[in-house]
Structure formats: C-alpha cells, structure tokens
Amino acid sequence: MNSQDIQVKRLHKLDKAEGKLKGFVDIAVQGALLIKGLRIMDGRNGLFVGMPCEQGKNGQWYPTVLPLNKEVKQQINELILQAYEEQV
C-alpha cells in the first residue's frame, strides 16, 4: 500500500485538550473504504494514533479496526500525525 492509498478525510483537533485525547480522525482507504473514529493520543513517548474501539458488555474496550501489518500501521500513524502537526 502506498501513501496515496490512504487519505485523511476529516481531522478534528480538540482545542485546549487537557487529557491525553488530542483529536479525532477519519481516513479513506483506496477511495473505497471510510474508517471513522481514529484518535490522536498523547502517550508517554509522544503522540500516537489509536484505532477505533468499542466497549463490550464486560466494560473492556475492544478494537474494531486493526492494521494487518506493521508497515500499514506505521503508514497510517505517519500520515495522521503529519496532518495533525500541519493544523497545530
């Protein structure tokens, strides 16, 4: 998958976000699939992208979308964080 296969469709930066959550992102994959609800988070090692998840009946959170390899995960991370930095 190349960088043109994934596009940021919507980025909502949270102004004056006090917690770890810094924004929400929707991405399009190959112009055919829209993935909503990715989160930009501030962690111990800086900003990272959290995949969409939902809470189960047991109170645990489970991912609903997962990259199938490290390269795609890294590509999504870099693309979203670059778009976020351009908005800051």
Image (cartoon, rainbow, N blue to C red):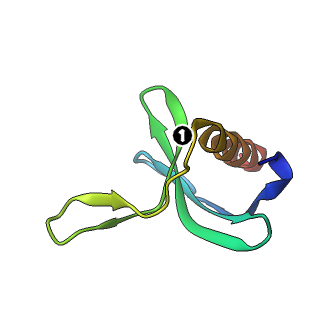
Q: Which residue is mark 1?
A: 48
In screen coordinates, is 19 left or right of 60? Answer: right
- Name the residue nearer the viewer: 80 or 28: 28
Would residue 72 be seen by someone viewing this image from the given angle?
yes
- Name the residue nearer the viewer: 30 or 8: 30
Q: Residue furthest right?
A: 4
The residue located at (74%, 42%) in the rendering is 82
* Disc 1 residue crowd, few under 14, some 14–19, many 20+, Cα 10 Å: some
Does 15 appear above or below 88?
Answer: below
The residue located at (23%, 68%) in the rendering is 56
Quadrant location of the C terminus?
top right
Three-letter amino acid code of the residue under disc 1: Phe
In screen coordinates, is 11 left or right of 17? Answer: right
- Name the residue nearer the viewer: 59 or 45: 59
The residue located at (69%, 42%) in the rendering is 75
Q: Position of residue 36 (x, y in %)?
A: 57, 69
Tell me where residue 6 sits by quadrant. Answer: bottom right
Q: Position of residue 53 (x, y in %)?
A: 40, 62
Q: Position of residue 71 (x, y in %)?
A: 65, 37
Q: Residue furthest top?
A: 45
Tell me where residue 31 sits by quadrant. Answer: bottom right
Q: How many marks?
A: 1
In screen coordinates, is 51 left or right of 5? Answer: left
Would residue 10 be seen by someone viewing this image from the given angle?
no
The residue located at (43%, 64%) in the rendering is 64
Instruction: Please tell me whether mark 1 sits on a helix, a strand or a loop.
Output: strand
